[in-house]
Amino acid sequence: MGMVPCDALLRRPAALLMFQAKKQFLTGPTGRGKTVCMNDHTRLRDGHAPHGELNGSMAAVALASEPAVGAQAPGTGVYAALDLGTNNCRLLIACPTSDGFRVVDSFSRIIRLGEGVSATGCISEAAIERAIAALSICRDKINLRKAKRLRLIATEACRAASNAEGFRSRVAAETGIELEVIDRETEASLAVLGCSPLVDPRGRGAILFDIGGGSTELVRIERDATGQDPEPRIKAWMSIPYGVVTLAEQFGGRDVTPDIYAAMEQEVASHVAPFAEQHGRDLTDMHLLGTSGTVTTLAGIHLNLVRYDRRRIDSIWMNDADITATINRLLGMSYQERAGNNCISVERADLVLAGCAILDAIRRAFPLPRLRVADRGLREGMLVEMMREDGALRSW
């Protein structure tokens, strides 16, 4: 059988498309399972909360009955941020508060949209179906919460795939969701905005990295040396064309030998080196700040969690020895052992070591003694940006 053209994966009966293209965020219950209610308030500034309070934007205080979202004053309504990445589909819905925002709903699912794109050049039919199923749930949640202020982005897979435009048209027709494909610079700036409260308030800045499915962004952020502006600003950034999916597909992710791992790390290091040469000096009072499934998984393994718990992960510190020991522990596991670990699961078992190789390349290029783990990023950045634009949020 010959190769199926990318555009053929996107065809649907014309009558169906004409009907579905008119549907815009239809309301009604999802029927797809219980909605997780996130009742915490997202605190601002340095990420610290009073003892006994949960820290961060998505910490689940309770799986309680869903609070109704009533009428909102202008600028204080319901906001939704969706991030369709190469590996994950994530949604965050929140309302602004006096010092941050309160998450009222969220969704996250591994869909591997970019699976095979590096080899075939296009998004596969199976990946399209997975994405549409996940995005349909997101649409229903947006309707249920009556979110009116939206930002719905797609990243590397939709930047790279030859059939990305057709995929987006099909998503719009079948779900009503109009995806915005952002460039790598915008992706980096949103990650910084979402994670900036976790920069050590006593330090000068951080080397932030976001290990995605299809790309990795590196950003040097610093505070004003005069002390007049305490908010960290972007000094330099770069993006490399490797994430956990693309690296694992090139080198293999199931059975990773020391030689394979070293080759992955070296490949990433060759891309990071020019940026580190120019922007990796004078690291006094700096630290690493990581936002990705790789670092949150490592933190869960480090803490020996029976299952992943965001309340224990977001904003914790890991020192260099902790990271090395945890990566070595993962390297000593078989694929089956990784798949059986509840902090990794079968969905990440073939990707986590590729992520570790990316992290090790970054650590060697920027030899800093501490890493702060962020279970937050693009979605929080989008929410903050929209709320600031509306005058509903003045500090972050």
Image (cartoon, helix red, strand yellow):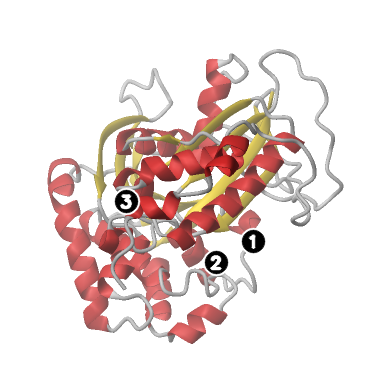
State which quadrant residue 268 falls in. Answer: bottom left
Give the quarter of the figure containing the C terminus.
top right
Q: CA distance from mark 3 to mark 2?
A: 21 Å
**Measured Cα–Cα span from mark 2 to mark 1:** 8 Å
Query: According to the image, label 2 marks what residue?
Result: 300
- Choose top left, top right, bottom left or bottom right for residue 66: top right
Q: Crowding at label 1, few (<14), some or many (≥20) Cα neighbours within 10 Å? A: some
Are circles 2 and 1 on residues that touch, CB within 8 Å? yes
Q: In the rendered image of this protein, does residue 103 appear above or below residue 267? A: above
Name the residue type under label 2.
Answer: Gly
Q: Amino acid at mark 3?
A: Thr
- Image quarter in which the N terminus is found: bottom left
Q: Is residue 377 visible?
A: no
Element carrying mark 1: loop
Which circle, 3 or 1, is nearer the viewer? 3
Q: Earlier in the sequence, mark 3 or mark 1?
A: 3
Going by the image, does 269 lie left or right of 212?
Answer: left
Q: Which residue is mark 1?
A: 309
Q: Name the element at disc 2.
A: helix
Q: Is 266 in front, or is 315?
A: 266
Q: Residue at x 73, y 30 (%)?
A: 146
Residue 46 x %, y %: 53, 37
Is residue 312 shown to the viewer in this render?
A: yes
Q: Look at 60% across and 20% down and name the residue there.
A: 393
The residue at which mark 3 appears reads as 216
Q: Relative to 230, does residue 143 appear above or below in the rendering? A: below
